[in-house]
Amino acid sequence: MTRRVKRKLIDACLQPGASIAGLALKASANENQLHKWIRLRQRADAAAIPVDAEAVPSPFVAVVTAKDTASVRNPEHHEYELYLAVENIDHTRTKARSPQTNGIVERLHKTMLNEFYRVAFRRKIYDSITALQTDLDAWLDQYNNEREHQGRWCYGKTPMRTFLDSLELAREKLIPH
């Protein structure tokens, strides 16, 4: 089911006097899943979170996160899981106690902490998140496009150069859907 169809279905269910069971049956959707989508929309509306895919398009088809107890305990009721379901985004979790699956991200977080945040907060007092985000974006651009890396995959190249050099190999290994 596309995002647009889901959105229209949820909108129809939110109309006064609408039969959620009837609309779910008509759309060949699971009624319980439809109830979850409606709850997510209502929570998002209450929190003023934009969920309109055309207003905030999601380029993601899959997300990998660490196993955290908040969403693992009761995933079908967690707002994040509901959002991913509404947006048709696959969610997988890293293997517990296995740094190999998340080590590169952990290393990036450590580098960001040591080379950006600790330095930035010593040099400047930020009066808004926007100002901090602007400086972080500039640092990330320098990190990805100018700074040579000695990591496992870069071999003295910038991450962007490594990415561009591997595009042809990635295309060869691409599995058609």
Image (cartoon, rainbow, N blue to C red):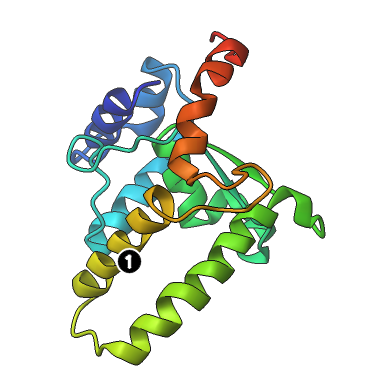
The amino acid pointed to by label 1 is Leu
Above or below, comparing residue 43 to residue 114 in the picture: above
Location of residue 23 (image quadrant): top left
Above or below, comparing residue 39 to residue 91 in the picture: below
Residue 105 horizontal/vertical position (percent): 60, 56
Which residue is most to the front? Answer: 156
From the viewer's perspective, tell me whether residue 148 is left or right of residue 11: right
From the viewer's perspective, tell me whether residue 80 is left or right of residue 140: right
Above or below, comparing residue 53 to residue 174 in the picture: below
For label 1, the SS is helix
Which residue is most to the right? Answer: 97
From the viewer's perspective, tell me whether residue 11 is left or right of residue 116: left
Q: Residue at x 34, y 64 (%)?
A: 139
Q: Residue at x 64, y 42 (%)?
A: 153
Q: Residue at x 20, y 73 (%)?
A: 131
Foreground residue among 153 and 31: 153
Q: Which residue is mark 1?
A: 136
Residue 22 horizontal/vertical position (percent): 37, 24
Foreground residue among 136 and 83: 136
Above or below, comparing residue 91 to residue 113 in the picture: above
Residue 147 horizontal/vertical position (percent): 44, 56
Foreground residue among 169 and 149: 149
Circle 1 packing at 10 Å, graded few (<14), some (14-19), many (20+), is some
Residue 59 horizontal/vertical position (percent): 35, 35
